[in-house]
Image (tube, rainbow, N blue to C red):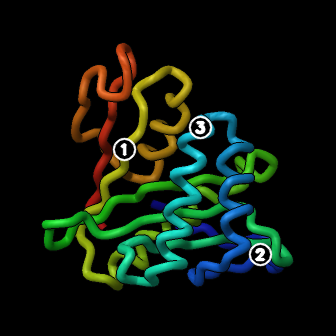
Amino acid sequence: MKQVTLNPPSLTIREEVRPEDRIAVRDIVESTGFFSAAEADVAVELVDERLAKGPSSGYYFVFIENEGQVLGYACFGPIACTVHSFDLYWIAVHRDQQRMGLGLKLVELSEQAIRRMGGRRVYIETSGREQYKPTRGFYERCGYHEDAVMTDFYDEGDDKVVYVRKV
């Protein structure tokens, strides 16, 4: 995966989760037009878990901001009962900020953090629906490869596609 430099320099990275991230995460997830209200609720619940339990929640975050406004984020964590495997649960960039390299940077930063925590493999799950074809292409451009397809997992005609990458 190629290295991405943030531009403009006013963009900042943070891993600390703040209460106001609940609103930012919901706004980002909803802006994409890909996720249901229930899925947006789950994204916010992970923020709540991290705020309530800290690292023991098993959820870790990376945020990219511009002058205090969150433009995109990723959430990842170790997979229970594994030694070196992590899930990348969420990666989302606000619709107005897409196609500027922020998603690629979030993947890069997440992988760096995962390596620091001893991770060796990262798994990403997504939908097999046609709407998610660009998402699957993004994961492939980031160096992930399709590892499994679970037919009709989410619903009839909506497969779960699992991607993996060694980091």
Q: Which residue is mark 1?
A: 125
Q: CA distance from mark 3 to mark 1?
A: 14 Å
Q: Nearer the viewer, residue 87 or 113?
A: 87
| Numbered disc 3: secondary structure | loop
**131 displayed left or right of 129:** right
Image marks 2 and 1: residues in contact by CB distance under 8 Å: no
* Amino acid type, callout 2: Leu
Q: Does dot 2 land on a helix, a strand or a loop?
A: strand
Q: Is residue 158 left or right of residue 51?
A: left
Please report whichever mark, 3 or 1, sits nearer to the chain's N-terminal start.
Answer: 3
Question: Which x, y percent locates residue 76?
Answer: 42, 65
Q: Image height check: is 156 above or below 82?
A: above
Which amino acid, by three-letter code, is at mark 1? Answer: Glu
Please state which of the two labelled residues, at mark 3 or mark 1, is closer to the viewer: 3
Q: Nearer the viewer, mark 2 or mark 1?
A: 1
How crowded is the residue under tag 2: few (<14 C-alpha within 10 Å), some, or many (20+)?
A: some
Assign a secondary structure to mark 1.
Answer: strand
User: Which residue matches tag 3?
Assistant: 35
Residue that label 2 marks: 11
